[in-house]
Image (cartoon, coloured by chain):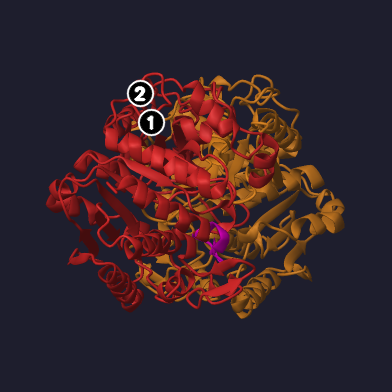
Chain colours: A red, B orange
Amino acid sequence: MDAVTTLIEYLKFPSVSTDSNYSVGMQGARNYISGQLEVLGFSVENIKTNLHPILLAERHGDPEWPHVVLYGHYDVQPADPFERWSSAPFDPEVRDGRIYARGAADNKGPTIVHMTALQRVLKKHPNLPLNITYVIEGEEEIGSPSMPKFFDDYAERLSQADYMLVSDTGSPSNKQIVITTALRGLIDVEIKVTGAKVDLHSGIHGGAVYNPLQAISEICASLHNTDGTVNIPGFYNGIAPLEDWERSQLDRYPESLESYKELLGVSSFAPCGNLTPLEAVRFGPTLEFNGMGGGYQGEGSKTVIPSEAFAKITCRLVDGQDPTTIQEMVIATIKERCPKQVELTVRRGAVAPAYLVIPPDRSNTPKKQPLALANAFRCVATAITNNFEKEPIYLREGGSIPVIADFKQRAGLDAIMVGLFTPIDNLHAPDESFDLELMNKAIATFEEVFISISNL
Amino acid sequence: MDAVTTLIEYLKFPSVSTDSNYSVGMQGARNYISGQLEVLGFSVENIKTNLHPILLAERHGDPEWPHVVLYGHYDVQPADPFERWSSAPFDPEVRDGRIYARGAADNKGPTIVHMTALQRVLKKHPNLPLNITYVIEGEEEIGSPSMPKFFDDYAERLSQADYMLVSDTGSPSNKQIVITTALRGLIDVEIKVTGAKVDLHSGIHGGAVYNPLQAISEICASLHNTDGTVNIPGFYNGIAPLEDWERSQLDRYPESLESYKELLGVSSFAPCGNLTPLEAVRFGPTLEFNGMGGGYQGEGSKTVIPSEAFAKITCRLVDGQDPTTIQEMVIATIKERCPKQVELTVRRGAVAPAYLVIPPDRSNTPKKQPLALANAFRCVATAITNNFEKEPIYLREGGSIPVIADFKQRAGLDAIMVGLFTPIDNLHAPDESFDLELMNKAIATFEEVFISISNL
């Protein structure tokens, strides 16, 4: 089967991890990809979890061979709203050089890129001197809740490997590939302030009680400085200054302030401290309000002083910030600034560290890097340049894939992340698609990569 | 029929003005009270409106006689949640000296107090030299939308009268009657701020855009000073300082800071500028947030930067503040303080002026008051003292009854407001009730009032 046919078959399984109505689709996708791995000569373990099993596949030969871990996920986002799709989300359709289906770009297309490249390489070199461990989980779209237990049981085995190859990040277009060098971490905090025991009539009682909406506004308004930086003591401690090579890599990124403004639909950007807006979304930490509410939510007016109000806050973190420390800093600052007339309750949500890897030959003060990783970076960059006719851009990404930092923390594995989806792929949205030209070039790239990172 | 039986019959009509399913109940209540007024010798006009007719009843004799306007409303609040009533809301029941039904206190009980008193007085003095105009509307509980048109057509006729008697306010208990000397005005403003054209991924775009929830927090947090006063330039202009007699009247009010705290369920009060909390809710203007929202409202976390956020704001106003001016001040201040990176839209809601009347012999600098009004105040106070064995307290009220200020503005009529419901009457709530001991004493009080304000 050619790559497109393989991908089409894979995309037909509606593997929506968040919805138990799709358990048959989850099983189908898992069995399909498990079968593909077995055809490639992998021994596949189906590791039970509380929800969707993790596939752990191994092609191991001489322990002296280089050892790479590939990571992907067989689950997809829900497809609704179905009516906004031009073709059915689980009935893949090729139109104008793209394949349309839920999961086409995130993450089934990139997985088939890796597998097809492996298939072609192993056909020519059945004894390729490369140990490969393939981890494909089924809960990435719901926050990878089973991975901590997986690391408890398998981190030691995984730590035998040299590094990871991952394609679950983006590039600006099918002409320009990005090697993602960092992912932001995340902390989640929700606060609730409570005033009077019930909602009060604002005429009869207005003037005597501290309005919880006023309290939550005052707390939230205090959390940024006028230059856009986060106003929490110690928040920026430990963050290394941005290096010139990172700025010049970003300069190669095909996006201007004007085109970005248009994309967002804003007339001007927020103040971003000493970063530009394009830097701020990649290199800086943030504190954002994701939701806030209290009191009357309907149309028109209702003269009530609400009993309570809430705010949902998340921070994106960068290398050097410890998520648990930052979460406690945020909470301590909020506690200190909360008016004493209202009661504060805090929900501590998830914490996930940032991930950063410095490519070789880039930093003035490089982190000590194993030779295998440094060489692999060079192999990947060369293969990309050969096949896409442009050097890759090394760029940090603003989003978070907590499991990548977990592979580093739990198994000591750094990741070389080759971005294979583009801004027009509609990830998590209707009409998700994957670019076939990019797919073909990426397969050729990874063929070259697998050969050059082996001991052949 | 005795007063209680009359009230029971009146309460059986489910006159819920807001719900068109109750139009038969509205008609029933209207016809019933119209019939009662005719029995008393009034000529009754049924004035058509867009919704519920207004009853305008007149008992006019010699134009030289004193002329009083009585005001009330025959509509009631909805009764739901029905399951929380101990007896059916439209099947009145007398228990432990109280009559339980929707509308018992607000406003059918007080209306029957006035009518029964009139009935008894007119029985003894059929030729009582007192001109009486009775206005009973059917849309008070939905904001009196037909009253402006009513004033257009009838203000001139009403302006022939000397003053009004109204019982649609409260007293602390059946032992202590309050004459309400002021009602706060109201302005309503809703603001919306818009950032990016759609909700954004807080990882991919966090750091570059001004979060509308941050903008709305900053705007709202700026609207109060730390001492609790409203931070809008000019907001307090024109407000006369509180006089000693008002403070000493409040001292007689049977509520302590401790008992008020317990009622509200708060551990401490908001800072109230130079007023005490019990003063602030009656004598001071306020700016309150009645509702606020934006972004994710469900459980847990969703890492979104919302496209928009809103805040619903109302101010309670006191004498000296022009509502339209204050509304424009609030809007201008918000416009000035809104971060320029977000777009602001404003909904101008209702405006209603405060109402204030100074009882005779109270102020150092009394407003010039017609003799008839001053005398009537003295008559009412004496009748209350005779029947309740305690002098009334003259006290401002924090709530708003815009129609009272309208009677003043449109027809030049001041109101003597005798509070006949108490905090345990459950207005607008399940198990609304009216105190029968208070009812009997109030009927005797108004008998005395009608005689003493006439030329008899």
Mark 1 and 2 residues: CB-CB less than 8 Å, in contact?
Answer: yes
Residue at (52%, 36%) from the top-left corner?
A281
Label of residue A389 in the image: none
Number of marks: 2
Q: Position of residue A254 (x, y in %)?
A: 63, 40
Label of residue A358 in the image: 1
Q: Left or right of A9: which side holds A176?
A: right
The N terminus of chain A lies in quadrant: bottom left
Q: Position of residue B38 (x, y in %)?
A: 70, 72
Residue at (67%, 40%) from the top-left corner?
A261
Neighbour class for label 1 at 10 Å: few (<14), some, many (≥20)?
Answer: some
Q: Nearer the viewer, residue B254 or A278?
A: A278
Residue at (38%, 63%) from the top-left corner?
A120
- Looking at the image, tell me whether mark 1 or mark 2 is earlier in sequence order: 1
Q: Nearer the viewer, residue B415 or B285?
A: B285
Q: Chain of mark 2?
A: A
Residue at (38%, 23%) from the top-left corner?
A239
Q: Chain of mark 1?
A: A
Neighbour class for label 2 at 10 Å: few (<14), some, many (≥20)?
Answer: few
Say if B212 sits above or below A81 in the image: above
Tell me the residue that label 2 is attached to: A366
Taking the magenta stretch, the answer to whether it contains residue B424 is no
Q: Amino acid at mark 1?
A: Ile
Q: Position of residue A350 (x, y in %)?
A: 30, 45
Q: Nearer the viewer, residue B371 or B190?
A: B190
For the magenta stretch, what is the residue range? A428-439
Q: Left or right of B261: which side holds B354?
A: right
Q: Position of residue A185 (x, y in %)?
A: 36, 38
Q: Secondary structure at mark 1?
A: loop
Say if B330 sits above or below A415 in the image: above
Disc 1 to disc 2, C-alpha distance: 7 Å
Q: Amino acid at mark 2?
A: Pro
